[in-house]
Image: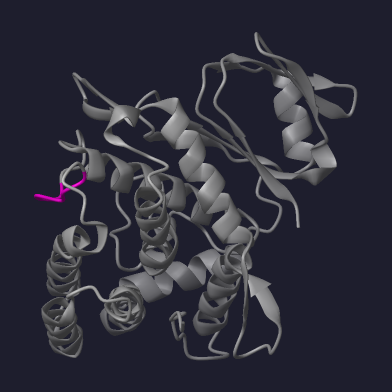
Amino acid sequence: MKKIVYIFSDGELKRQDNTLKFYCEETNRYLPVEDISDIFVFGEVNINKKLLELLSQKEIVMHYFNYHGYYMGTFYPREHYNSGYMTLKQAQFYLEHDRRMGIAGAIVRGALKNIRQVLKYYANRGKDLDASLQKLKEFEEQIDGCADISELMAVEGNARECYYRAFDKIIENEDFVFEQRTRRPPRNHLNSLISFGNSVMYTLVLSEIYKTHLDPRIGFLHATNFRRFSLNLDIAELFKPILVDRVIFSLLAKKMVTKQDFESGMEGIVIKDRAKKLFVEELDNKLKTTIKHRDIGREVSYRRLIRLELYKLEKHLMGEKEYEPFVARW
């Protein structure tokens, strides 16, 4: 499988004949274009039109993040797989209340089940999480009673808040307490890690959508309005607990990231580059990890699971098979 290239250094990314070369103070290195699926840019990197032409030819998506680790935008090459038929289907399902609620409800149910799986994993390792698990089960039971998207979003938001409050019992580190969910800006170290990880997750899903017939602008749980993309936010809800949050717990348990890896600024708590690099390395390793897929009967990577989730949604929209979200089983 092709790999993701993460660039943290400042420099210049150029086309060198039919491949890529990154020029920076530390080193100049070639990046074999045939091996690359995506480029994530965290540093100050200059590019030019020749480079973009090559990325477009090779169908390589390039994402930019700012100094704080927030997603800024994407060079999204001309869609090679985009389908007018599929876009119309997405719009049709979005506009029909019951159909939209069916997909949105399935996503929330899947997200809550994956959240509970994460908590069960740590409960089985001695963490006192019974009360949180029970509360999350009650939230899950409320999904079918939701009359509209706003009620569904409220259930999902309350469940996630309950889940985040359980982080303190899992992490058990006074330097990384949850307090409350704060985003822009994050007010503490843990919120900063959550925001960074979620931002990367949303972008990973966007890359996978590019390789399908789906339109990233039309989601179902998250409103399709003036935001750039929303479908990636929907699908990311399923994978944030089992990928992003597990990486956070692992980094903190192993003391690979400490409070010295953060600094305070005008924009709240900022993660230093060292910790960002460690985070994406751990996440990249997680994405490459394989599990036995129940339906297709063979080993697939977590990254491939994201694509398979999108294919399942395509089949649902075409009326071939009812959409059922991926739920982790450890």
Could you say where residue 174 lies in the image, as x and y percent from the top left?
A: 16, 46
For the N terminus, the image quarter is bottom right
Quarter occupied by residue 33: top right
Could you say where residue 89 lies in the image, as x and y percent from the top left?
A: 49, 73
Q: Is residue 179 magenta?
A: yes
Task: Say which residue appears at 63% left-offset and 58% top-offset.
Answer: 82
The magenta stretch is 176-181
Residue 57 or 29: which is nearer the viewer? 29
Left or right: where does residue 103 sit relative to residue 80? Answer: left
Question: Which is the main secondary structure of the residues drawn in magenta?
Answer: loop
Task: Say which residue appears at 42% left-offset and 42% top-offset.
Answer: 256
Task: Say which residue appears at 60% left-offset and 67% top-offset.
Answer: 307
Q: Is residue 10 above or below residue 171?
A: above
Q: Can I make out residue 202 in this image?
A: yes
Q: Can I make out residue 65 in this image?
A: no
Left or right: where does residue 59 sit relative to residue 11? Answer: right
Task: Say which residue appears at 62% left-offset and 65% top-offset.
Answer: 289
Could you say where residue 127 lies in the image, as x and y percent from the top left?
A: 23, 73
